[in-house]
Amino acid sequence: MNFSFKLKRRNFLQTSLWGLASLGGLFYSGQSQEKPMSASPASWPRIKEYRLLGRTGFKVSDIAAGAIQDEGVLRAALEAGVNYIDTAEEYPGHHRVVAKAIKGRNRKSIFITTKLAVKKPNESRASFLRRARRCLEELETEYIDCLMMHMPERAETLQTPGFHQAMEELKATGRVRFVGVSNHGSFWFKDPAQTMDQVLLAAADDGRFDVFLLAYNFLQMDRGDKVLRVAHEKKIGTALMKTTPIAIYYNLKKRVEDLEREGKKVHPLYREGLKRYQAKLARAEGFIKKYNLQNPEEIKAAAIKFCLDNPHVSTVCCLARTYDEMEKFISLSGTRLSRSEQARLELYRQGCGELYCRHACGLCEPACPHQVPVNTIMRYHYYFATQAREKEAMSLYQLLPGKKAEVCQECPGYCEKACPYDVPIQGLLLLAHSTLTLS
């Protein structure tokens, strides 16, 4: 069964907010980092598959470590055979966590990527060199395996002279081995930026980028499939993020129930937006019960297996807060989707796909007369609803420049009309605003 279903910059994010990422986790909010492991890491399953990371020549574990903030969890993952670690300059404190976790290990056996955002078009070579050297100091390593340009919003940003001049010098001195680029959609605060695939396909044509980090999952493949195919052809390594778009249904259902119970007086357009969302939610709920899709853990596991099934994928980055979560991820290494799991994902897509605002999409944003950054707001809501990063998500939302989703209650829903996936985005935006402001 074939499962190819058919500021103004990021500077404002570079705050200590990511220090709150210890709240982060992939499965459920409310879990504690102190939760005891189900078994010692020594008895865990081990990584079963290693894949070539494009032209780097390095064989990476198919399950990789995302921005895991717990040193013990990260160290246990390494002990189990994980050898790809994703981090970034703007994740305050995370470089230090990585440094502690890799201490005493064979450095050549681990592939570390970190990321630098381009702060301004004319940022100098000296500025990038200074920032890269700080990353090296914090990571306590002699070299970075791949230094990525973090979230360029436009293809022209990929050409930033200062960045490439710095990378050439760092590579010449052995301080950086490869160069990459990450992207999961635009921030779109004033002018519409380019889509993920437009930026990454331009990066592939550029020829100077060896590894891509991109958003991809079983509900959102159109843009990613194009990138993965071209990356494979050009021997560019690929790492995935945002691979489990599952908990949106399970978490937002409770928020809708809370709003109804509070009985607050709301604007009619707000009520209509929620009504459209609730109609789709009710349909999804009936679908989930009918086809027994009520275990989110099974769907999440299948979602990761879906990504591992793609031969053009090098590795899947997983974010875990607890030993139990990490052990579950490790157990998926080397696995593939069964026919029954394929069928369950297809059923979930049919029943719940309309409730997922696609990462790295933004197709509806040009239709918004208020220039609301839909993609960014829904990403923050994803952090809150599915990754247990509640305080961070709320703080990031407050820092957004310009108009936020409160204006959506006075709008007839231009975004919904423009959405090709029939997502009730106005209702989702209103829910996001209510959730991220606790209003």
Image (cartoon, rainbow, N blue to C red):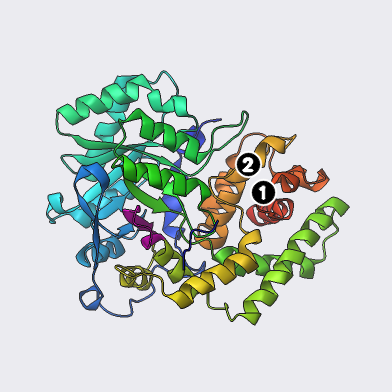
Q: Residues within 10 Å of mark 2 (few under 14, many from 20)?
A: some
**166 left or right of 32 in image:** left
Q: Nearer the viewer, residue 218 or 60?
A: 218
* Vertical comparison of 287 with 111: above or below: below
Residue depicted at 36% across the width and 62% down the height: 308
Circle 1 residue? 420
Q: Is residue 183 above or below residue 216?
A: above
Residue 267 image position (x, y, % from top left): 86, 52
Crowding at mark 1 (Cα within 10 Å: few <14, some 14-19, many 20+): few
Residue type indicated by callout 1: Pro
Labels 1 & 2 near each other (Cβ < 8 A): yes
Q: Report the Cα–Cα distance between label 1 and label 2.
A: 8 Å
x and y percent of residue 327 in the render?
32, 72
Q: Name the kind of residue labelled 2 in the image.
A: Leu
Image coordinates for residue 91, horizontal then vertical, percent: 39, 45
Residue 76 visible? The answer is: yes
Magenta-drawn segment: 307-319
- Residue 314 within the segment the image draws in magenta: yes
Residue located at (20% from left, 66% from top): 79
At a point 35% along the width and 54% down the height, the residue shown is 313
Query: Mark 1 or 2, which is nearer the eye?
Result: 1
Q: Quadrant of the C terminus?
A: bottom right
Q: Quick one: SS at disc 2?
A: loop
In what element is the residue under mark 1?
loop
Q: Between disc 1 and disc 2, whose residue precedes?
A: 2
Q: Of the numbered discs in the image, which one, if any, rests on residue 363?
A: 2
Q: Which mark is residue 82?
A: none
**Measuring 48% from the left and 44% from the top, which residue is drawn there?**
184
Question: Is residue 186 on the magenta stretch?
Answer: no
Q: Is residue 327 left or right of residue 421?
A: left
